[in-house]
Image (tube, grey):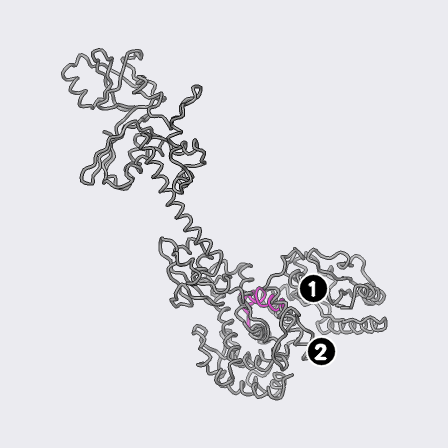
């Protein structure tokens, strides 16, 4: 589709334009174009785009491009109306309130609204502040979103034509084109045209965008091409004619076509394959489609007879298909002047597979260096294949050929008239929708998704805390079904969890199985924690009954056959474990050869109180009988003093003990100097006084602190008076550090007002 000469900017809708704009239309459709011009022309008056492009000339150019694509009258008329400047931030009016619908009917109005919606999407995407919005994945999501927003394929064609016309205007007027605009064309619109099989739009977009993005490289390649595009096209036309005549003489029915490579494609191949310009043999290429495999090789023989083959450039993908299943014969031959060109030969079945199947042309071209290593076809790809077949069918009808059924697996297109088959394409995004974050990142969700689904897709914690949502700036209920193209903002609480109502399918909060699973996981975790708490209370109550409150619960669980204490609690809460087994465990005699586990002892074997080994040195002698006074319970590193008793050796007191001070004052001759000796292997009993507001589970929580710190409780004395509890725990510690940790941990228990050593 060579770019036409630029129309007079002052009179864009002249007679020559009308002749081009109405080409191929039925006489009855001409009236619609004339009415659209009459409606749009006064509204174009003096209007220009931000780039400076006159909007009247833009609308006229878009219609010329669409006419070259053999679209129907409604598409061409809607393109004129859609180019009229409007406030894109305002929501689209209902059809009953839309003046376009009143004047031109609902079909044209829907096309206009759809085209403006895609334009709005482009504006939002360009304003993205999220770095991820510019990634390759996000560009692909934008392509899918663009298709999904266009329930009618004609809307996509209008958008592509509008983009191409803007590029043409920049080239013709020599007005600088922004790099972002050119990059967006290469990343978003050209690949979309490629996937739809609209090759002419694709290559012209790519060449123009490349020209603005990389002007030096563009000029370099242009200089390297010794022939002008017209001359190259003439070469192709001559080669096609010669090959057709040779195949006819050989009795081989075949279709022969060809197109020259464009500048961007040449540069892309040089870049990806790291080739020099002189190493490119497919600047000109022919494609031959025959009936069967035997004809493929016969045609190959004819090609090699007519032109000189280059053996090192021959690839037989029929006998050795590519990994993705692509099959074809590729050969490079040279004419009498030594100009090389490529010829591809394949059957119609191979061609259909290459164009519409898993190995579609866009797949292995866009895969880059990976070649054909691309994933299998998806529903999205099948929709694209359907669109491309519709376009091909439309072109055949316009050319007067017999239309072929696009796909027997799908219903045939409805509606008569030329150029209307594209409208019959199935609505895009029937099973997926594409919405935007406030930073313009595209999010893919299942059809029927709600703001809650959107929140869970972004982050599980955001989903749990979701309490409201804004869609396109308006507050909406959480059950609102989202539509493609909407911008969604989540309002979240600082903390909290989901509602059980979200799991009720009748209320419509969730459509995504993934989000529903996350909500279930939340409630399963809550239920598990409740069972753990319930089971822990049962186990500790049983231990209190047995007088074993100082047991290490983790060790107890392992002795009972559980991996963790939590597993024991859950089993107890679910009545899957009998608490009598705990009593039975303690009744079992300990093996004589093995020491009793420290976690299950009442008073350990190395307890200073039971063993009599206080670790205290009396004036440098460790053999004298010593005992720790019960009144103050000294423990390292307390300052200590000794008092010689009658018949019970030396009694060891803390130096600040009131009882000791009274004894020393009465009988100072009995006071003796003492000091701590080796104490690292000895446990010393100390009294801890805890005052707290009495509540259910208080003793359990305090006992859990001792168990967690692995401290052995050898005595408990509790009193409760007027909702105030006073508890004295006798705990065995190795020294002051363990005592300090215990006091700090006890002070953090809810309800505890003080925890001090007595």
On screen, 473 above or below 528?
below
Q: Which mark is residue 353?
A: 1
Q: Quadrant of the C terminus?
A: top left
Decide which of 449, 44 is in the foreground and name it.
Answer: 449
Q: Which residue is mark 2?
A: 402
- Asked whether the viewer can see residue 220, the reply is no
- State the image coordinates of residue 655 (x, y, percent, origin top left): 22, 22
Q: Give the extent of the magenta segment.
A: 175-195
Question: Quick check: is 179 in the magenta stretch?
Answer: yes
Residue 553's disc number: none
Give coordinates of residue 73: x percent, y percent: 59, 82
x and y, in percent, of residue 643 in the image: 21, 15
Whether 106 is drawn above or below 623: the answer is: below
The answer to which of 192 and 492 lies nearer the viewer is: 492
Q: Residues within 10 Å of mark 2 (few under 14, many from 20)?
A: few
What is the CA distance from the residue labelled 2 to the residue labelled 1?
21 Å
Residue contact between numbered discs 2 and 1, judged by CB atoms under 8 Å: no
Q: Looking at the figure, which quarter contains the N terminus?
A: bottom right
For residue 688, say whether it is visible: yes
Picture quarter containing residue 291? bottom right
Q: Which of the two discs, 2 and 1, labels the residue nearer the N terminus?
A: 1
- Give the vertical position of 521 relative to 664 (above or below): below
- On screen, residue 198 versus residue 565, left or right, reads right
- Residue 496 lies, in percent from the top left, at 36, 53
Residue 366 within the magenta-colored segment of the rendering: no
């Amino acid at each position: 589709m060579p770019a036409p000469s630029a129309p007079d900017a002052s009179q864009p809708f002249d007679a020559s334009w009308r002749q081009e704009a109405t080409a191929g239309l039925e006489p009855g459709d001409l009236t619609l174009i004339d009415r659209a011009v009459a409606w749009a022309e006064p509204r174009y008056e003096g209007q220009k785009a931000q780039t400076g492009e006159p909007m009247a000339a833009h609308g006229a150019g878009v219609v010329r491009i669409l006419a070259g694509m053999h679209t129907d009258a409604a598409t061409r008329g809607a393109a004129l109306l859609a180019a009229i400047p409007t406030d894109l931030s305002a929501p689209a009016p209902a059809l009953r309130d839309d003046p376009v619908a009143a004047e031109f009917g609902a079909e044209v109005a829907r096309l206009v609204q759809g085209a403006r919606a895609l334009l709005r999407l482009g504006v939002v995407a360009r304003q993205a502040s999220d770095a991820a919005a510019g990634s390759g994945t996000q560009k692909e999501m934008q392509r899918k979103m663009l298709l999904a927003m266009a329930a009618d394929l004609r809307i996509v064609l209008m958008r592509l034509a509008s983009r191409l016309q803007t590029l043409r205007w920049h080239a013709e007027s020599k007005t600088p084109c922004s790099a972002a605009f050119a990059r967006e064309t290469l990343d978003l619109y050209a690949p979309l045209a490629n996937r739809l099989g609209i090759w002419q739009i694709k290559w012209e977009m790519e060449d123009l965008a490349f020209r603005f993005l990389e002007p030096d490289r563009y000029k370099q390649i242009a200089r390297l091409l010794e022939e002008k595009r017209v001359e190259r096209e003439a070469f192709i036309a001559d080669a096609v004619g010669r090959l057709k005549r040779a195949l006819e003489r050989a009795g081989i029915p075949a279709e022969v076509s060809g197109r020259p490579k464009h500048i961007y494609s040449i540069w892309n191949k040089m870049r990806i394959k790291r080739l020099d310009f002189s190493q490119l043999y497919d600047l000109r290429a022919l494609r031959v489609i025959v009936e069967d495999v035997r004809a493929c090789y016969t045609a190959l023989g004819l090609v090699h007879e007519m032109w000189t083959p280059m053996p090192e450039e021959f690839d037989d993908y029929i006998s050795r298909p590519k990994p993705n299943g692509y099959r074809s014969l590729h050969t490079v031959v040279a004419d009498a002047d030594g100009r090389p060109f490529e010829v591809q030969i394949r059957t119609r079945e191979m061609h259909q597979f290459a164009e519409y199947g898993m190995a579609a042309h866009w797949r292995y071209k866009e895969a880059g260096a990976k070649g054909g290593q691309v994933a299998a076809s998806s529903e999205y790809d099948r929709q694209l294949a359907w669109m491309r077949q519709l376009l091909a069918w439309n072109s055949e009808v316009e050319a007067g050929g017999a239309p072929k059924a696009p796909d027997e697996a799908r219903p045939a297109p409805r509606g008569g008239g030329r150029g209307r088959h594209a409208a019959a394409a199935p609505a895009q995004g029937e099973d997926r929708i594409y919405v935007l974050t406030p930073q313009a990142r595209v999010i893919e969700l299942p059809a029927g998704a709600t703001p809650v689904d959107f929140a869970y897709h972004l982050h599980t914690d955001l989903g749990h805390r979701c309490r409201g949502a804004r869609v396109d700036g308006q507050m909406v209920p959480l059950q609102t079904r989202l539509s493609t193209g909407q911008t969604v903002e989540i309002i979240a609480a600082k903390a909290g969890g989901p509602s059980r109502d979200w799991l009720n399918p009748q209320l419509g909060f969730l459509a995504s199985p993934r989000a529903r699973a996350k909500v279930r996981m939340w409630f399963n975790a809550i239920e598990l924690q409740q069972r753990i708490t319930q089971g822990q209370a049962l186990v500790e109550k049983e231990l209190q009954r047995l007088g074993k409150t100082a047991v290490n619960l983790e060790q107890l669980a392992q002795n009972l056959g559980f991996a963790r204490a939590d597993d024991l609690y859950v089993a107890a809460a679910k009545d899957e474990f009998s608490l009598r087994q705990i009593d039975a465990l303690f009744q079992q005699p300990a093996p004589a050869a093995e020491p009793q586990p420290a976690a299950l002892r009442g008073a350990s074997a190395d307890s200073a109180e039971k063993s009599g080994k206080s670790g205290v040195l009396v004036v440098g002698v460790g053999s004298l009988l010593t005992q720790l006074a019960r009144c103050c319970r000294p423990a390292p590193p307390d300052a200590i003093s000794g008092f010689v008793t009658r018949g019970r050796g030396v009694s060891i007191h803390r130096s600040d003990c009131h009882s000791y001070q009274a004894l020393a004052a009465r009988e100072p001759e009995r006071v003796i100097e003492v000091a701590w000796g080796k104490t690292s292997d000895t446990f010393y009993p100390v009294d801890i006084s805890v005052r707290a507001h009495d509540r259910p589970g208080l003793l359990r929580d305090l006992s859990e602190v001792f168990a967690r710190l692995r401290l052995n409780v050898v005595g408990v004395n509790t009193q409760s008076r007027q909702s105030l509890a006073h508890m004295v725990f006798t705990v065995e510690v190795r020294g002051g550090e363990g005592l300090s940790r215990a006091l700090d941990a006890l002070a953090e228990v809810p309800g505890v007002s003080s925890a001090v050593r007595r």
